[in-house]
Amino acid sequence: MLYGDINLINTEMDIYRSITREEIREVANKYLNDNQRLVLTYGPEKNKPNR
């Protein structure tokens, strides 16, 4: 059961598909600010023994 609605699993994809690009852009502009980001760069460890 999702969020108290046993039928939600049947309509969940429709909910996702109903979201517009403009709505995503609006939320991104509101919550994803230049001063609130993290850049993470990672790669394989050097000289790590194989298991």
Image: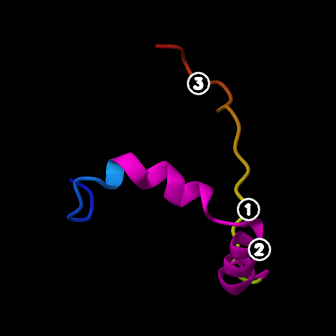
Q: Compute the Cα span from label 3 to label 1.
A: 24 Å
Say if mark 3 contacts mark 2, CB within 8 Å: no
Marks 3 and 2: which is nearer the front? 2
Q: Amino acid at mark 2?
A: Glu
Boundaries of the magenta span: 10-34
Q: SS of the residue at dot 3?
A: loop
Q: Amino acid at mark 1?
A: Val
- The residue wearing badge 1 is 39
Marks 1 and 2: which is nearer the front? 2
Q: Amino acid at mark 3?
A: Lys
Q: Residue at coordinates 77% horizontally, 73% vertically from top-left?
A: 22
Near mark 3 (Cα within 10 A), the count class, few <14, some 14-19 or many ≥20, is: few
- The residue wearing badge 2 is 22
Q: Compute the Cα span from label 1 to label 2.
A: 25 Å
Percent position (x, y) of residue 18?
Answer: 61, 62
Q: Main secondary structure of the magenta part?
A: helix
